[in-house]
Image (cartoon, helix red, strand yellow):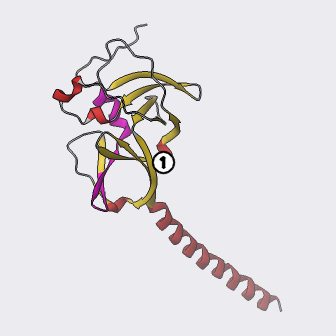
């Protein structure tokens, strides 16, 4: 009797282990899929990983920063955080068209991270799930992690760690002196 009970428990454990393997294999395929929030800024569409977004709020005019580069619109408070608002479209625009200020902003996307940044965008579109293997890592812009092609359109996936350096390119960053 004890032998039969031990055999039954052992087979139940083996079945649970096999089910666990199947569960972990299916969860790893789920983990490979990532979610992007699509936004439009100027003529381009961009993708931001949803885990990198802290808030999306209606447009409000940022407080300008003196001597800031053209792509830095100013600072705004979102959920108690002071965030530097960047004009995402102006980071890709040629030097000739930077003289015309853009005014079509409709929303601000607050980003997570140590840089405390937000993006001024024209529209927030749908969320999109994709696998890392679906996008190509080819871009001339260092703040573009890669390009996802979908329905004949290109979606530039943002590399948030390179946004601020791209925005202040050619400007000295002020440092605190102690």
Pointer 1 residue: 50
Quarter of image, res 120 = top left
Q: Nearer the viewer, residue 17 or 60?
A: 60
Q: For this view, does 66 lie left or right of residue 80?
A: left
Q: Residue at x 46, y 28 (%)?
A: 116
Vertical placement of residue 30 versus 62, above or below: below
Could you classify mark 1 by the number of other residues whose Cα lies within 10 Å: few (under 14), some (14-19), or many (20 or more)? some
Q: Is residue 78 magenta?
A: no
Local SS, label 1: helix
Is 167 rendered above or below residue 11?
above
Q: Quadrant of residue 21?
A: bottom right
**Furthest residue to the front?**
104
Which residue ends up furthest to the right in the rendered image?
A: 1
The relative height of residue 73 versus residue 175 in the rendered view (above or below) is below
Report whether 140 appears left or right of 24.
left
Residue in the image at 45% along x and 17% along y: 63
Closer to us: 38 or 136? 38
- Percent across and percent down for residue 23 are 57, 72
Q: Which residues are magenta?
A: 147-167
Q: Position of residue 39 (x, y in %)?
A: 40, 45
Query: In the rendered view, does 137 fall on the left or right side of 11?
Result: left
């Amino acid at each position: 009797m004890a032998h039969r009970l031990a055999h039954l428990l052992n087979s139940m454990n083996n079945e649970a282990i096999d089910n666990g393997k199947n569960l972990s294999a299916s969860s790893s395929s789920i983990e490979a899929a990532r979610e992007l929030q699509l936004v439009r800024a100027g003529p381009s569409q961009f993708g931001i990983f949803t885990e990198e977004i802290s808030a999306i709020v209606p447009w409000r005019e940022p407080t300008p920063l003196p001597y800031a580069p053209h792509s830095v619109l100013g600072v705004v408070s979102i959920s108690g955080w002071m965030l530097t608002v960047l004009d995402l479209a102006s980071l890709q625009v040629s030097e000739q068209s930077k003289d015309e200020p853009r005014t079509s902003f409709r929303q601000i996307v607050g980003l997570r991270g140590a840089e405390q940044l937000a993006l001024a965008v024209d529209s927030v579109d749908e969320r999109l799930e994709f696998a890392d293997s679906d996008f190509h890592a080819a871009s001339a812009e260092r703040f573009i992690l890669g390009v996802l092609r979908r329905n004949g359109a290109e979606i530039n996936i943002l590399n948030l760690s390179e946004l601020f350096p791209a925005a202040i390119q050619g400007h000295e960053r002020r440092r605190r002196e102690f």
